[in-house]
Amino acid sequence: MSKLKPDVTILQSGIFSKWDEHSDELPKFLKATVHIPAEIDIEFGFVAQIRKAKNQLMRYCIYHPDITDEDGEVMAPFDGEVYVESNDWKFFLGDTIWAPLSNKVGRWRMTLEIRGKVVAEQSFKVHHTDEEQQISAFWKRRGF
């Protein structure tokens, strides 16, 4: 196992075009934000650049608000593992909003771990569209 310490940087974080899991292309970056409107099929997440970690096992995890399944049970976080493909690799971790919107609102947290240590994380607030307008109005009143 390599003694190099992985170097991980979040390059882009926010809203992206629809991700095609069968393509080698990363989704297109559309907007930098941590405030995500609760809209069907909106894609959000981050692109991380991972260096000095080739062939190391990386765990990804998406912690979502208490989303329930068809039986009313709270779903477990979405997670998995992937091997880092090269010494300078870009990885997209993201999710999309699906119906019903009501149980998707809240804090979503996405993490990457290598060797049991969190090397990248980002939180997003998914909210109804009217909340975004209120936030925007708040900052406009303050001159931003």
Image (spheres, rainbow, N blue to C red):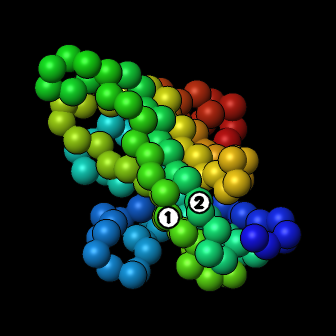
Q: Are marks 1 and 2 in contact (CB under 8 Å)?
A: yes
Which quarter of the image is occupied by the N terminus?
A: bottom right
Badge 2: residue crowd in 10 Å (few <14, some 14–19, many ≥20): some
Q: Residue visible at 84% across and 71% down?
A: 4
Residue denoted by label 1:
82
- Coordinates of residue 29 in the picture (x, y in percent): 47, 67
* Residue at screen point 14% across, 26% down: 70
Task: Tell me which residue sits at (49%, 57%) in the image.
Answer: 81
Task: Name the secondary structure under disc 1.
Answer: strand
- Side of 99 relative to 78 (left or right): left
Residue 128 or residue 126, whichever sits in front:
126
x, y percent for residue 125 = 49, 34
3 above or below 110?
A: below
Of the pair 135 and 59, the residue shown nearer to us:
59
Going by the image, does 29 lie left or right of 118? Answer: left
User: Which residue in the rendered view is the most extreme toward the left?
Assistant: 70
Q: Position of residue 52 (x, y in %)?
A: 76, 75
> How many badges with numbers are in the image?
2
Which amino acid type is marked by label 2?
Met
Can residue 106 be seen from the camera position used here? yes
Task: Please tell me in which quadrant of the rendered image residue 67 appears.
Answer: top left
